[in-house]
Amino acid sequence: MTNSTLLILLSIGLGAGMLSGFVGIGGGVVIVPALVFLLGLSQHEAQGTSLFVLVMPVVFLALTNYWKTGNVNWKYGLIIAIAFIIGGFFGSKLSLKLSPQIVKLAFGLLMAYVSFQLIFSSIQEIKAK
């Protein structure tokens, strides 16, 4: 591994960690595109690597900050986590049956849709004030 690759990986991790703690995102929105575009990983390899990161207790300290201020709904989180495990299993099976190009297209369309929804709902909330 070269020093520049190490620097890119550290930057991806720090950026994803900061955004995860700040707005609750990281893996799919930051790590996957960064691995694809900055290091040339395939869509499937980037997704697998991002999932590996999720297996680690990487968000523990950020979660602790939210918990200390009473901003964690443990019951909802547990239900989502259990469903996430099942969904992750079937989602990965589906993804690996499709070409990386189709998965990348679907991923990009999903990110665009979510982005537009967030932007337009924020504009409406700002106008309402």
Image: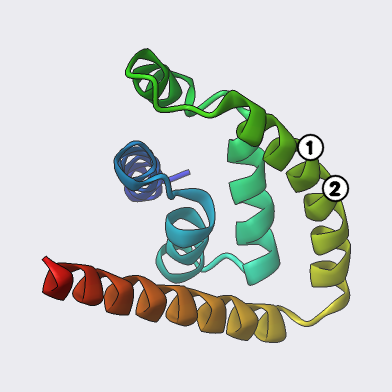
Q: Position of residue 21 (x, y in %)?
A: 35, 36
Q: Are marks 1 and 2 in contact (CB under 8 Å)?
A: yes
Q: Quadrant of residue 116?
A: bottom left
Drawn side of residue 82 relative to residue 22, left or right: right
Measuring 58% from the left and 38% from the top, which residue is drawn there?
53
Measuring 47% from the left and 54% from the top, which residue is drawn there?
31
State the CA–CA distance, disc 1 to disc 2: 7 Å
Q: Amino acid at mark 1?
A: Ile
Drawn side of residue 31 relative to residue 127, left or right: right
> Residue under circle 2?
86
Q: Amino acid at mark 2?
A: Ile
Drawn side of residue 103 relative to residue 46, left or right: right
Q: Position of residue 29 (x, y in %)?
A: 46, 60
Can you tell which mark lies on residue 82?
1
Tag count: 2
- Helix, strand or loop at label 1? It is helix
Q: Position of residue 106 (x, y in %)?
A: 63, 82
Q: Residues within 10 Å of mark 2 (few under 14, many from 20)?
A: few
